[in-house]
Amino acid sequence: MTKKYNKYRTRINNKIFDIVVYAILLGVAIITIVPFLQVATISLSPAHVASSYGLHLFPKEIDLNGYKSILRYKTIWTSYGNTIMRTVLGTGISMILYVTGAYPLAKKYLPHRKFWTLFVIFTMYFSGGMIPMYLLINNWLKISNTIWALVLPGAMSAYNLIIVRNFFESIPDSLEESARIDGANDITILFKIIIPLSKPCLATVSLWCIVAHWNSWFDCMLYMKEESKYVLQYTLQRILIDGQVQDINLVDVVVNTDSMKMAALMVSIIPIIIVYPFIQKYFTSGVMIGAVKG
Amino acid sequence: MSKVKSMEKMERKKRKKKDISILQQYYKCRYLFFLLIPTIVYFVIFHYVPMYGVIIAFKEFYPLKGIMGSEWIGLANFKKLFTGVYFLPVLRNTLIISFAKLIVGFPMPIILSILLNEVRCKWFKKGVQTIAYLPHFIGWVLLAGIVQQVLSPSTGMVNYLIQQFGGEPIFFMGSKAWFRPIVVLSSIWRNCGWQSVIFMAAIMGIDSQLYEAADLDGAGRLQKIMHVTLPCIIPTIIIMFIFAIGGVMNDDFDQIYNMLNARVMSVGDVIGTYTYRVGLQQMDYGYATAVGLFKNVIALILITTSNFFSRKLSGSSLW
């Protein structure tokens, strides 16, 4: 009798527990997504709706003027191009450096291996800071106002390099030895054996590079002097935060700046939201790789 | 006498042999080392040269004179740091915001990952994860725009709800009382989901036999969380906590720069934004470098000591 009662009670408890868990998680999801819904709605709404009070979760009236005026703004297009260019170039350079750098560090017979690893890891814990970096780029290397100022300084991070190295280390040595017996040297082994085997890890790290390039703006603000060289995020920042949007719609009918700002926001977010669900698993698998050994 | 000489000779020979053997080692691995060279060059130029550049913190630096040509002024910049009226409030803001983020924000991803682990319904779990990770992939420029929109006193939804419940609309972004909570909450909003990934990984690594044993002992689900899941992920929690402590001095520049405005300067100005303003807008290079150096040294000390204590107390550490 009591046994049956106990079983019944645990079942009830489990139900309550489940309800609480699901409710909290649903709350988390809603809180995360709702601001995006509002942004999307405002970007699609005519001025009188956008400036009125309300939750604005779903557009009631569609009006594309916000998008029209933002897409007429030439800098949006050039900066879109610049962002794509820096992302492609920067990710390419980074991946070449990660692969070539991680492979020797993964090899136990590299002389002074410990020293070279520390040489890299030390940069994780100490850095020169903002000003010496600025002086380096601007005054000594003199690469400011070129794309190299956006691509080279952040080309590698010690953290990612160590992640790639750890993955390389996990590849069994026997594969390599058999290739070596066939007369392959380190470079052929790297390209013929190691890289094909590490695709998941390399995909993850390159996705991180892409995201970082897509979202960065501060380097552009520091080093780029002409509007034609701005990257997307910096242009958006000028539109969103500095409110420099006024000068671009002097010619036309008054468009609500709110919906225009939000349209600008959407223009940059949409590609991320479209691609993101498909590649999300690579991002998370990368964290798992990193979690194995820090 | 001759014995000593011959011993010296042998010693020299030994040393010579060792030198050669190191060169030989490198020669033997020349392809391997050749691959490492770009990495070394990169880290030297973009990490170690700026570290060397830190010495301008001790100089009256003029770009035209260069580092070597500029005059030594010793610790004058650091003296200015601690006696001036600007730096200490900035340091206070940084610490308040960072510690608030740490105290409120650190447990969140742990709770989230444990809750997600309790979900049996696959699509629900996946959906929540996908949504929760999303803001991490969007930069602060855009997120700050979104936050501003949502909190706007005239059209934002938060103020709409406040008014529906009979409150007065609040100008969150311009309010000294609200700015720090907004910074902390929006940072949690962005990062909580993504940070839970690492704890999810740790939870998945737990041996399922432990849960079965707990089942046999008649443990409820809450008890299993408290006595199996949590103890098993403690090492991960500690490692992440060390990282978080090390990051206390690293204000999130991207976030705060994009949210800061003149009204809330007194509560929101942090080391990053201050360094940028003083160094790159007012061109006071030496002083701004001193600010940055101070920050980096404190961060280094913090991470080393917390690592030390965690190794002493629990055996898990970064190195």
Image (cartoon, helix red, strand yellow):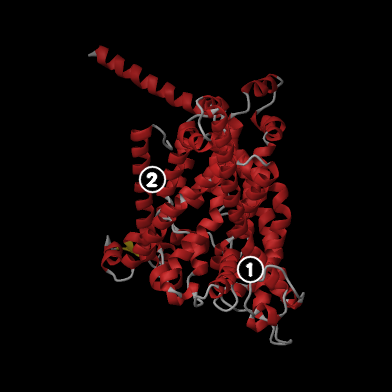
- Amino acid type shown at disc 1: Tyr
Position of the N terminus of chain A by quadrant = top right
Where is residue B35? Give x, y as percent: 60, 37
From the viewer's perspective, is the residue at label 2 or at label 1 nearer? 2
- Tell me which residue sits at (50%, 25%) in the image: B217
The residue pinned by badge 2 equals B303
- Residue B181: assigned label: none
Task: Please determine if labels 2 and 1 lie on a single subunit.
Answer: no
**The residue tagged with tag 1: helix, strand or loop?**
loop
The chain carrying label 2 is B
Residue A12, given in percent of the width and then of the height, sits at: 58, 40
Query: What subunit carries mark 1?
Result: A
Foreground pick, A262 / B222:
B222
Name which residue type carries label 2: Ile
Residue placed furthest toward the front: A1
Residue located beneath label 1 in the image: A230
Q: Nearer the viewer, residue A207 or B44?
A: A207
Pointer 2 local density, CA inside 10 Å: few below 14, some 14–19, many at least 20: many
State whether residue B277 is above or below residue A121.
below
Residue B311 as seen in the image, left or right of residue A222: left
Depicted B212 relative to depicted B118: above or below: above
User: Which of these two is toward me, B157 or B147?
Assistant: B157
Q: Is residue B198 left or right of residue B241?
A: right
Viewed as shown, does residue B49 lie left or right of B9?
A: right
Q: Secondary structure at mark 2?
A: helix
Q: Please tell me which residue is depicted at 60% across the width and 65% down the height of the picture.
A: B142
